[in-house]
Amino acid sequence: MDPGAHSCPGAKTLITRRRAIGLGLGAASVAALTLAGLRAARLPVPGLPAPTYRKDRFIFEHGEKYPSSHASTVVQTQNGDLLAAWYTGAGEKAPDVAIYSSRLARGGDSWSEPRVIADTPDQSEGNPVLWVDPGGSVWLFYVTMYGTSWNDCKIKYKISEDHGGTWGEEAILRDELGWMTRNSPLVLKDEEILLPVYNEVNWHSMVIITSDWFKTWRAYGDLDSPGGAIQPTVVRRDDGSLLMYMRTDADRIWMSESRDEGRSWSPAVATGLNNPNAAVCLLKLASGRLALAFNDSTSDRNPLNIALSGNDGRTWPYRRIVEGGEGKPGSFAYPFLAQSDDGRIHITYTYNRETIKHVVTNETWIRRGL
């Protein structure tokens, strides 16, 4: 595929006000921290496994106001809140579909009333992706359907400077129809940003890379499988290479890797992980392990599983069912993963196309699944 350059004149340059993220503890402060102090500071205690943890909640109740909901995304904003987004309307591709958002304040126990954050009149929105840049600004990537199918989409974005409280004007990332978003960007070396995207027309996956915050960008990769390859999710492995997993209609998750910062990708190959033609999500955890959310089936979006790998995805020895399984019919799909600063893992996903469910857990809970 020709990685031709594209320009997005509506983008903002945020790099000049990027702030360092981290605890910044000096030696004296570290020495003074007691075991209790570490717990109070919400930091993992070195050498001690965290107790198993899981908590479930719905972000909102299904009803006439929210008839059909799908394709959630979640991040922790710089002020510690969780922010989620998804699309809601009469049904997928319906002209009333809009992007909604809700907030779970740090220390809170319930999500705020959903509100619309992107809505093009008489056009369907889809596949939102929230991302917090290194400076703390929140980005919303999404698509708008200028026709009757996903083939007719344009990729757009908005930026919030107040943790998702208010949003700037929408900008077009890609004006040509047919490309879509689904998973999070990745910060590369030299302050470049990689955004996984895919072509709905031919069901191929690729990435776009920018060095000027999406003012301009280039596309790389043209990945396929016998059952297509869409909705790529990308993480960096410990050896510096990039790992991409993709949804396919070939019974398995397919993968590719890049050893040159996303400029070239190995031919896609099947993993041993099941896939019923449904979205998957990878996340590099603070521990260095990889987490994967996926439907462990070749035919149904049930069950929804989460898995852990300690060797950069070569094997996934720890797996646990998040929702569904034997005796619990339903569709539980399109998972999205985030990790908060207390080390807990957040999973949001579509629950029967009716609402969005939020599960909070940790590595200990997953590891005890066997």
Image (cartoon, grey):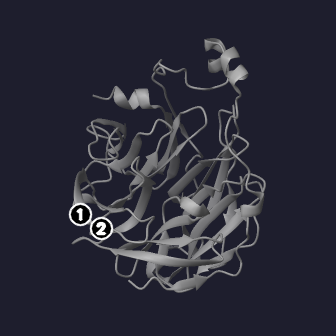
Pointer 2 and pointer 1: residues touching (CB < 8 Å)? Answer: yes
Q: Can the viewer see residue 65 in this picture?
A: no
Decide which of 317, 289 is in the foreground and name it: 289
* Horizontal relation, residue 204 to residue 121: left or right: left
Which residue is tagged 1?
269
Q: Rounded to the nearest whole Å, what is the CA distance between mark 2 and mark 1?
A: 9 Å
- Give, as a three-letter code, the residue at label 2: Ser
Residue 9: which quarter of the image?
bottom right
Q: Can the viewer see residue 312 in this picture?
A: yes
| Residue at image coords 74%, 50% | 19
x then y, percent, for residue 161: 77, 58
Which residue is tagged 2?
266
Residue 306: which quarter of the image?
top left
Of badges 2 and 1, nearer the viewer stands: 2
| Residue at image coords 44%, 67% | 262
Decide which of 344, 327 is in the foreground and name it: 344
Task: Please tell me whether mark 1 sits on a helix, a strand or a loop.
Answer: strand
